[in-house]
Amino acid sequence: MSIIEDLKLQYRIGGIANKMIYWNVGIFLISIPLFYQFKLGVFDYPNWLAVSSEPTVVLTRPWTLLTYAFFHYGFLHLFFNMMVLNFTSRLFLTFFTQKQYLGLYILSAIFAGLVYVLSFYLLGKSSMMVGASAAVMALLVATTTYQPLMELRLLLIGNVKLWHITAVLLILDLLQIQIDNTGGHIAHLSGAFFGYIYIKLLQNGTDLSRIVSSVIEFFGSLFSTKKATTFKRVHVNSKKPIEKRNSKIVTKDKTQQQIDEILDKISKSGYDSLTTEEKEFLFRTGK
């Protein structure tokens, strides 16, 4: 199997986390010939893609509160964001669903963008921002809020608790907020705060990711080519079952977990290391 085919397979069956990384990397590659200033050695994103700190600009281009979270200022910016995104995604999807992942990514990016605009307006500064860092921090803090005592093994360090890692990253953001990249650190902390609120609301029965799901379904229905089904009269039981209004936290299904394990094996040892049963399982799932 060629590298291209392997990448296509991982995108098709790799789940929302893989797709999010593919989108970030793909958009970065496309942005190089379009927005990279080779003479200056920097990216120059227009204010209809990057989020501006000017409220009047954001009001006329509200979509930038989301688009900025898929663009990056350079290879290292992209690399570190995607490395941490891959790490946090695996943790988050251990406990939550792909719809909750997508909802948190989108909503935290929008929230962090709004806080960035408001903060710079109050500080009297003018700038533009891109990067997925806010959404990455939201995923990390959300998982930490739900399972703070989860133990992780780090190279050269050994076992550490998840909240230790998160605390170090948040402290670094706080210490550097007035030194360099003020807007970026404000976005990081805003995303972290949203991740915390998201989990607390979810534990109390309010799943904010349903907002994103509803919007996607609405626009999907507008562009759907399927004809409406004819009305059928059916008998309805007048006694409605009692619904439990407990926490709406949902664990991911076993099929996706098995796919994740197989993809991990591919990334470590290659496709040829899979057993016949695992290859057949991927083939069936890919259909």
Image (tube, helix red, strand yellow):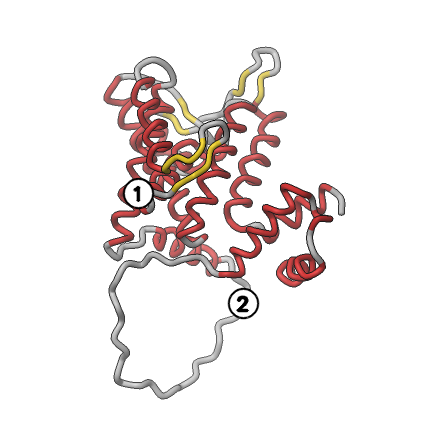
CB atoms of marks 1 and 2 within 8 Å? no
- Labels 1 and 2: the sequence-earlier one: 1
The percent position of residue 61, horizontal first and vertical second, equals: 40, 34
- Of residue 151 and residue 54, the one placed in the foreground of this image is 151
Q: Nearer the viewer, residue 98 or 145?
A: 145
**Residue drawn at x 34%, y 52% as measured from the top left:** 211
Q: Residue at x 71, y 59 (%)?
A: 276
Residue 142 is left or right of residue 268, and the answer is: left
Compared to residue 2, the image places residue 97 above or below, namely: below
Return the x and y of residue 69 as percentages of the image width and height.
45, 34
Q: Nearer the viewer, residue 263 or 274?
A: 274
Q: Nearer the viewer, mark 1 or mark 2?
A: 1
Q: Image quarter for residue 51?
A: top left
Report x, y in % for residue 80.
50, 28
Q: Is residue 95 visible?
A: yes
Local crowd at mark 1 within 10 Å, few (<14), some, or many (≥20)? some
Q: Which mark is residue 226?
A: 2
Residue 143: x and y, percent?
A: 36, 44
- Read off the residue under disc 1: 145
How many dots with numbers?
2
Residue type for callout 1 = Thr
- Toward the right, the furthest residue is 1
- The disc at residue 50 is none
Residue type at mark 2 is: Lys
Residue 195 image-quadrant placement? top left
Q: Secondary structure at mark 1?
A: helix
Q: Secondary structure at mark 2?
A: loop
